Every structure is written in C-alpha cells, then in structure tokens.
Image: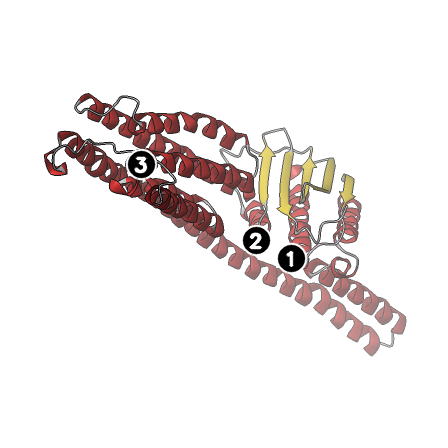
Amino acid sequence: MEEERLREHLAIIDRTILVRRVTLGSFCILAVAVLLSSKISPLNPLFSVPFLWLLLTVPFEHLVHRQRTLRAVQNVHAAFFVIEVLFVGYLVHRLGGVEWIGVMFYLFTVMYANFFLPRAAGYLVTGLATGSYVLVAFLEYLGLLPHFRPFSHRTPPYRDLSYVLATVLVGGIGIYGILAFTVRAFADLFQRKSEELARRKAVLERLSLKLLSAREEERRRVARRIHDEMGQALAAARWALAAGKVEEADKLLAELGEGLRGLARELRPPLLDELGLGAALTNLLEDFSASTGIAVERELRVGRYPPEVEIAIFRVVQEALENVRRHAGAKRVIVRIKERNGKLVGSVTDDGVGFDRHRISEGLGLSGMREWISLVGGELKVGTGPGKGTRIEFEVPLPSSETTS
C-alpha cells in the first residue's frame, strides 16, 4: 500500500514538474518579450530569477526519484518550496516590492505546497511565503533594504509602455493563463483519481459479492458436516446405547468430540489466540503435511502482533495451502515469514503445475487473500506460470510498538 501511494505521488509530482517548467518557461519567454520591447535592463531579475528557478527543477526531479518513502519525498518537496519562497522573495524585492504585482508570484508555491504536503507543512510554507512578502515590504519601508524601481515612470504608469507591457504580459496574460493551465492540470489529476476510485469501488463490490457467496458456501459446508458426519455419529451412538453396546457408543461419541474440535479449529484456531501466529502456523503446516503427504519446509521468525494482523496472515497461508491441496499437484511447499524494515513479509511457494495468469482469472481464493492483506494495509503479489509452480508473496506494515526483533 505504501509503495502504491508513493508511485501515485511521484506520478503527480512528475506532472507538476512539467507544469512548473511550462509556467517558468512561459515567464522567461514573456520576460524576454518585455525586455526586447522596453527599456528594462537585460540583467533585471524579471528574467534571471525565473530562469534559475527553471533550472532548479532538474536536480529537484532527480532527488525526488531517489527517495524510497513518501515521507522522504515530502521532505525533499518541502525543501524545494522553501527555496522557491527565497527566489520569489528576491524577485519581489528587485521588482519594486509592494509597488508592483509581486504578491502574485507566490501563488503557485502556495498552491503546490498545500496540495502535496501534510497540512502542517503546507501551512508552514504558506506562512513563509506570507512572511517573505511582508518582510520585504517593511524592510524597504524602514529603509533597511534598498528599493528598486523596475520602471522609470517619467510618464504616468498607464502611459508608460514598459509598465503596460510588463503588467499585461506578466500580470494578466502570464499569471492568469498559467493559473488556468495549472488548475486544469490539477482537475485532470483529480478526474483520473476519481475514475481510479470508481474502478476500485466496482472491484470491491464484486469482491464483496464473492465473499458473501463464499460465506454462504462455508456455512453450507459446516451445516453438511454437522448434519452428515456428526448427525450420523449421534444417531449411531443412540442405537448403540439402545442396544446396550456401551463401548461402541463411547467410541462413537469420542469420534464425534474429535470431529467437533476439528471443525472448531478450522473456524478459529485456538492456538492463534493462546500462543500467537507462529504456533498456529506450525500446527497448520504439520496438519497439512500429515493429511496430504506433501513435504513442507518452514521458516517462521515471528512474534505476537495485533489480532487483525495475525488472523489475516493465518488466513492467507491457510488459503494458499488449500489451493496447493486442490490444484497444484505439488510435492513440496516452502513457507517463510519474518520481520523486515518494520514490515511482516512472507511467501508461500510450491513446485506444482502453476497456471497461466493471462488465461485464468483470479478465483475467489486469490481475491480473498488480497482482501485479507489489504484490510491490514499490506500488499500481495502472485508469481506463477504453466509448469513453474506458484509463489504467493505478501507484506504487511507493523506498528512500531508491536514490532519485535
């Protein structure tokens, strides 16, 4: 789940890096147009700062894609926003402070920060942007910073071609045009996200129907066992008692008791509650090997975990073994589960016939396993092929307080 969120986040960042490059490139083009059509110096930060800002997206993209966790990506992004605020603050200072439209230059940094970062970090960047503008304004007011006038104003501003061109191109066409482009990019992202959520909802609805069917099938199976096996055993015990065959009745009742205990273990293994995941899996694997004759190799380096994690892992291994029993034709099964990097990772591998995933859709067994793992925030992968056996891999994040070494 964490890796999927990271991939989605990086895909959105790649899109916004493109948006940044379009916006900053547009500013550079507009600045060149203003410089060529006015008396503004070519060294004016109106051009140089957006150009440097544009170049900064190259190392930023490289650093973002080197990160392996969502938190690390957010930290790199936050650092980039801080640098953006510094660039914009300098640009505002060199372009007239409060005298021109510099307050608009922080717009995209604030938008992106509150879109990508956690709430507190987004508010922090917003505060830095606001504080940067206020600081420039009052330092110039108090005379602690020199004031730069980007326009000569030898004539009224509305009659000054440099002022009019810069304001219309950068302020009007530039900012509002780029704002429309940015909002449209975000709207497209949200639309794709909504479509993906709708697709996942449809998948979950289909899975819920399958699970309801499976639950009813399990109830029918239990009812049949109670009616056929245990009902017959009770009837036979009654007849034996009626005939005075006490020893035979005692034997039948003992078999009935063992059958009830076996059914109870299938529905909810008591070892899972009493001794934990390791003991419950060990018992499951021993019973599986004894009943099928399939060799089982196990490596279970596990401790105690939250109940929902233990039951999810147990059910996944149980279902994987049931698939091996019914379909694999395997001679050997390997089960490995251990803690690694704050996660519980495991696999169930068999040397059976495997299957072609492109020709055979996932049945209820695999869908149920995915559902169990997703309920505890994990991921499950299936590797198989005709004649290549099957490997079920899963990983589940563990709360730090629950992780044991």
Residue 306 x/y as whole percent:
68, 57
The one nearer the camera, 74 or 367, is: 74
Label 1 residue SS: helix
In the displayed structure image, the side of residue 404 where residue 46 appears, left or right: left
Label 3 residue SS: loop
Q: Which of the two discs, 2 and 3, sits closer to the camera?
A: 3
User: Given the image, on which type of amino acid does mark 3 rest?
Assistant: His
**Residue 291 vertical placement versus 172 (above, below):** below
User: Given the image, on which type of amino acid does mark 1 rest?
Assistant: Glu
Residue at the spot 77% in from the left edge and 70% down from the top edge? 236
Residue at the spot 58% in from the left edge and 30% down from the top edge? 385
What crowding class fits label 3: few (fewer than 14 Cα within 10 Å), some (14-19), or many (20 or more)? some
On the image, numbered disc 2 is attached to which residue?
Answer: 375
On the image, numbered disc 3 is attached to which residue?
Answer: 147
In the displayed structure image, the side of residue 15 where residue 385 appears, left or right: right
Q: Earlier in the sequence, mark 1 or mark 2?
A: 1
What distance separates the C-alpha of mark 1 from that of mark 2? 9 Å
On the image, numbered disc 1 is attached to which residue?
Answer: 308
User: Given the image, on which type of amino acid does mark 2 rest?
Assistant: Leu
**Residue 376 vertical placement versus 381 (above, below):** below
User: In the rendered image, which quarter is residue 388 located in?
Assistant: top right
Q: Which of the two discs, 3 and 1, sits closer to the camera?
A: 3
Residue at the spot 73% in from the left edge and 37% down from the top edge? 334
In the displayed structure image, the side of residue 101 where residue 198 appears, left or right: right
Q: Circles 1 and 2: CB distance less than 8 Å? A: yes
